[in-house]
Amino acid sequence: MTETQNAHAPHGHEPHDTNFGGRLNWLRAGVLGANDGIVSVAGLVVGVAGATTDRTAVLMAGIAGLVAGAFSMAGGEYVSVSTQRDTERAMLQLEKYELKTMPEEEERELAEIYENKGLSPELAAKVARELTEKDALQAHAEAELGIDPNDLTSPWQAAWASLAAFTVGGLLPLLAIILPPAGWRVWTCVLAVIAGLFLTGYVSARLGSAGARRAVLRNVGMGALTMLVTYYVGVLFGVALH
């Protein structure tokens, strides 16, 4: 392959899929949701295990925390994305009105955007005119608002994704503390949680193109601190109850 051909050949590290960024954001949100599930449920079950060796009590507390946390995450995500979607729809309606009532001003505004990005005035005007002729709303929405009118985020999709991610993460410490014998529960849970947090920290760092070592240490450190504090809170309550 010649040097010229190499220059035009596709590179594996350059994504050309227009939906790649959206899928990457969803994947990152899923990893962070699983991370929240691990830390939240681990802190709860380790705290209860510090107060009592009763397997049923630990199980019930873990299940309650898992269900409450998952639905809290899903509800929060639904409300947040619904608000964002309503705002985007309102902005699109305003853009439609402006395109209908003042098309020439809107085309000049679009040309100015491309001119500010470095295009010559003549080329910017040509680009604005051709994009407006093809799909005026999409051209203006993407350039002015940063919105793709054909790809608005679904609140229900966001809610279900958050619920699933939190549940998957929360199951790790719950199973790790319920399945082993009483004397091994806490340490088994701690080791499982550290492994899970190592994985989520590493994956989230790689997805964000950041250094993995610092992200992993931060992730594992915060999880370990959470379990340490909640365990001794449980111990203190257990002592006080007895």
Image: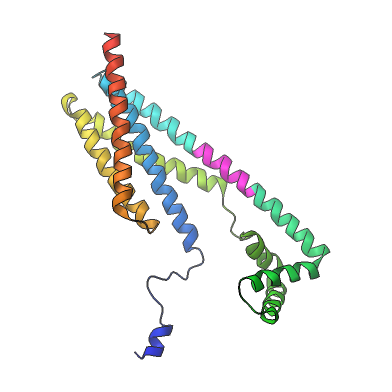
Residue 75 colored in magenta in the image: yes
Q: Which quadrant, please, contains the C terminus?
A: top left
Q: Which residues are magenta?
A: 74-85
Which residue is depicted at the point 72% across and 75% down? Answer: 133
Question: Where is 186 relative to 236, above or below?
Answer: below
Q: Left or right: where does residue 18 sit relative to residue 182? A: right
The answer to which of 50 and 220 lies nearer the viewer is 220
Residue 240 colored in magenta in the image: no
Residue with the most extreme right position = 101
Q: Position of residue 205 (x, y in %)?
A: 36, 53
Q: Left or right: where does residue 84 sit relative to residue 130? A: left
Q: Position of residue 43 (x, y in %)?
A: 33, 30
Question: Where is 166 relative to 45, above or below?
Answer: below
Which residue is depicted at the point 52% across and 48% down? Answer: 157
Q: Position of residue 30 (x, y in %)?
A: 42, 48
The answer to which of 123 and 18 lies nearer the viewer is 123
The answer to which of 108 and 186 lies nearer the viewer is 108
The answer to which of 171 and 36 lies nearer the viewer is 36
